[in-house]
Amino acid sequence: MCVRSAAASDQEGLIMNSSIKVSVFILLLLLASYAVPADAATYYFGGAKKQLSTATSEVAAGYYDATTLYAVDPSFEAGNIKNTVNIFGIVGTYEGAGGTNYGLPKTGQRPGYPSGTPFLAGDDCSYASPEASDIGYPRGTGSWTAYNAARFTNNGNGTITDNATGLMWVQDGTGIGCNNGGNLTWEAAIAFCENLTFAGYEDWRLPNIKELQSIVDYGKLNPSMDATYFLNFQQYDDCFYSSTTFASGTGSAWYVYFYNGYMSEAQKDNNLFNVRPVRGGL
């Protein structure tokens, strides 16, 4: 039978405590000798914290600070998400393009525009009235005055958003975004739009003929567009190229004459017309 003395037990306890202290001391030395960057708040044991970015959809493995997607990209908000769609807990409210209140816009013909409208029950004006059949978008405004206010939005950065189609247009017909009002061949007009950086966007393009027609106001003349939003109309020199080729003669392209809304075709190389870039769409 072995008997452990009290003195031996105390000695073992002292040895164990000493070992723990030595281990802690060694750990502290190791930590102290580890090179910690001056900006230690952005590092975990020497590894840089990761940052979420709008430049990629990839999320790399690593350490991240607590954040919100809105902090990473302020455009991630309800107003930019399709109505009722839930993305990461954000329920969309947007009812423009991709929402529930978009489509072919009204032509612009309403009582008195043009003079004498409506001409007959069942004509364009009769069905377009927001107080009646309300054909044409945006719908549900209740009155022509409210419709006119709801159709376009001035974004305050030289662009206009059409709330019926979701298209964004360059606002100033003689501004830098429209080649300072200068005329171009069809090919040069396409190249100008494709290479345009304006209002922070780089995805501008030459509109197709239906898109270009969508901003014609058939209730107005000189210009046949809403001059409250589309600025600096050039009388008798406001033919705008579309990107759409004329099927009966592929050397020509469709254009719109915004003095009266007339649409026709012209040879791509022999005619110099204006350009109004567009982006987005249905």
Image (cartoon, rainbow, N blue to C red):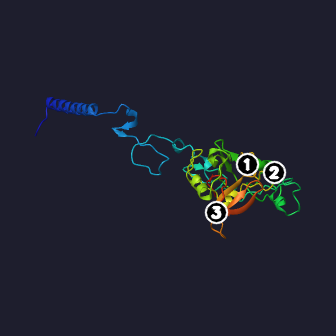
Q: Position of residue 99 (x, y in %)?
A: 65, 55
Which tag is nearer the camera, tag 1 or tag 2?
1
Q: Residue at x 11, y 38 (%)?
A: 2
Tell whether 21 sits left or right of 163: left
- Which residue corresponds to mark 1? 234
- Between tags 2 and 3, which lies in front? 3
Instruction: Return the x and y of residue 78 as percentages of the image width and height.
Output: 61, 47
Q: CA distance from mark 1 to mark 2?
A: 27 Å
Name the residue located 25 percent from the left edge and 34 percent from the top edge: 30
Residues packed near mark 2 inside 10 Å, few (<14), some (14 to 19) or many (20 plus): some
Indicate the secondary structure of the residue bearing disc 3: strand
Q: Residue furthest left?
A: 1
| Nearer-N-terminus badge (3/1) | 1
The Cα–Cα distance between marks 2 and 3, rounded to whole angstroms, is: 32 Å
Q: Earlier in the sequence, mark 1 or mark 2?
A: 2
Closer-to-camera residue (132/241): 241
Verify CB contact (< 8 Å) between mark 2 and mark 3: no
Instruction: Give the camera-side residue of 279 and 242.
Output: 242
Q: Does residue 143 appear in the picture of this structure?
A: no
Label 3 vs label 1, nearer the camera: 1
Q: Nearer the viewer, residue 64 or 214?
A: 214
In the displayed structure, 50 sits above or below 114; it is: above
Question: Residue 147 in the image: x percent, y percent?
Answer: 77, 50
Q: Amino acid at mark 3?
A: Thr
Mark 3 packing: few (<14 Cα in 10 Å), some, or many (20+)? Answer: some
Mark with earlier residue (2, 3):
2
- Residue 227 seen in render: yes
Distance between the Cα atoms at labels 3 and 1? 23 Å
Q: Secondary structure at mark 1?
A: loop
Amino acid type at circle 2 is Trp
Q: Which residue is mark 2?
A: 144
Residue at x 28% of width, y 30% of height: 32
